[in-house]
């Protein structure tokens, strides 16, 4: 299994996947890791290939190998690609809510909220993945929903 990502995100993602397979290789597509990151992968039993990638090969929709610019190949049967999460729905943005800067680890563009899930726009609360820039989880989504509900109830009780 290959993981296509670079930097700290790539190291984190590849190490996480060791629970699924003992044959994981991080492909950085020409981007170099630090010595410390290389050491982390080695200790975690994750392979590393930093060569620029020219493509992926396989019959039909199947994946057989990563093909490198130097002509070499690495046999892989699956590939996980790190992507940037972003807000697909516009209402919060249209109402004037601010977005966070994508952070390096999660690359999440989240709607900015305070500790009580308030956006700063009067009456607008955001909970769950849409507002999180911490690792998304069901527990975190539920907790932020609970806080949003509490904050909204206080606002309504105060007649605002
Ligand atoms: C592959 C994967 C594995 C995961 N594994 C775990 C795990 O093991 N443990 C864990 O705790 N968390 C896990 N998570 C994270 C967890 O699923 C999320 O953090 C959690 O579901 C967030 O809840 P939410 O209500 O904020 O968002 P969601 O569960 O995504 O719900 C949002 C809902 O809004 C709907 N929606 C979106 N746009 C619109 C629109 N414009 N109009 C109407 N409806 C809309 C969507 O269809 C969706 O039903 C995993 C996530 C993924 C993707």
Image: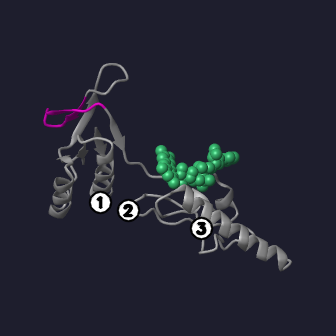
Ranked by sequence position, the earlier of labels 1 and 2 is 1
Under circle 1, the secondary element is helix
- Between the C-alphas of marks 1 and 2, the distance is 8 Å
Magenta residue check for 26: no
- Is residue 14 shown left or right of residue 99? left
Please provide percent x and percent y for residue 51.
17, 44
Q: Are marks 1 and 2 in contact (CB under 8 Å)?
A: yes
Query: Which residue is depicted at the point 64% across and 69% down?
Result: 117
Please provide percent x and percent y for residue 120.
66, 74
Numbered range of the magenta stretch: 65-77
Which residue, given by chain and number where applicable, does mark 1 sit on? 8
Residue 149 in view: yes
Q: Which of the labelled discs sits on residue 104, or is there none? A: 2
Please provide percent x and percent y for residue 23.
23, 40
Under circle 2, the secondary element is loop
Q: Which of the labelled discs sits on residue 98, or is there none? A: 3
């Amino acid at each position: 299994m290959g993981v296509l990502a670079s930097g700290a995100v790539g190291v984190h993602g590849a190490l996480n996947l060791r629970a699924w397979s003992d044959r994981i290789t991080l492909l950085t597509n020409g981007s170099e890791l630090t010595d410390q990151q290389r050491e982390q992968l080695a200790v975690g039993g994750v392979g590393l290939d930093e060569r620029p990638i020219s493509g992926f090969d396989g019959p039909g929709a199947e994946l057989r190998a990563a093909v490198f610019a130097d002509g070499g190949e690495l046999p892989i049967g699956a590939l996980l690609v790190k992507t940037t999460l972003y807000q697909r729905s516009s209402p919060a943005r249209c109402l004037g809510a601010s977005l966070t800067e994508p952070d390096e680890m999660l690359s999440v563009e989240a709607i900015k909220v305070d500790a009580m899930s308030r956006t700063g726009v009067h009456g607008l609360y955001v909970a769950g993945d849409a507002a999180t820039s911490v690792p998304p989880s069901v527990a975190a989504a539920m907790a932020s929903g609970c806080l949003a509900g509490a904050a909204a109830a206080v606002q309504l009780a105060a007649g605002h």
